Amino acid sequence: MIFQGILTAQSSQEILMVAESKLIFSEVSYFTKKKVFNTLMECTQNISIHAGNFPATISLQETPTYFQIRTQNQISEDQKENIKKTIFQAMHNPIGYVKHKRDILDSSTKKNTSPGLGLLHIIEKSNQQIQYHFKDKKQILSFQFQFKINKTDENHTNSCRNANPFCSF
């Protein structure tokens, strides 16, 4: 499944309906289906909040061993630095990750356009190293993000603990 265009409430709903219909026929556990669906929903929410009226791309691919989700959307230079910080702290610094998550929760009443809990939840659910990069083309900066969810990962507590000992599932 691939979506390319401006993400609206209507297109987000359609993406999720198509994904749900495809997941129904997938031969994986209910937990894995729920994890993929919720992560895809988190991706669409993040893009609709941060991409504005710029085109975005979302794809969901099923392989024999995992689901792969890819996104791409336009961002500002400030968002780039915040995304780098969020991903680094979540993947490499458990103590910094917990502090960063607490800071996001503390500032939830303020208008915040930096990557926040949504990106952290996606990283937690992936249970693997994520792949991301920034593309600067004709002074338009975009963020490309891809990660996998294993089909055989049935124990969400243990998988989350392996990815990040301070996760909050």
Image (spheres, grey):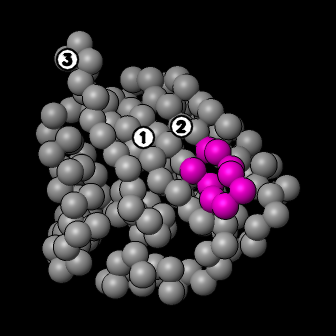
Give the spatial CA distance, label 2 vs label 1: 9 Å
Residue at 67 percent of width and 37 percent of height? 1
Amino acid found under the numbered disc labelled 3:
Gln
Instruction: Check whether the beta carbons of the residues at disc 2 and disc 3 lie within 8 A of each other.
Output: no
Q: Which mark is residue 147?
A: none
> For the view shown, which residue lies furthest in the right direction?
25
Q: Read off the magenta span.
A: 60-68
Q: Mark 1 = which residue?
A: 47
Residue at 23 percent of width and 78 percent of height? 94
- Relative depth, front residue between 35 and 137: 137
Residue 107 lies in quadrant: bottom left
> For the view shown, which residue lies furthest in the front direction?
64
Instruction: Check whether the beta carbons of the residues at disc 3 and disc 1 lie within 8 A of each other.
Output: no
* Vertical placement of residue 89 versus 116, above or below: below
Give the spatial CA distance, label 2 vs label 3: 22 Å
Q: What secondary structure is found at the residue carrying circle 1?
A: helix
Q: What secondary structure is found at the residue carrying circle 3?
A: loop
Give the spatial CA distance, label 3 vs label 1: 20 Å
Percent of width and height locating residue 17: 73, 45
Percent of width and height locating residue 64: 72, 56
Amino acid found under the numbered disc labelled 2:
Ile
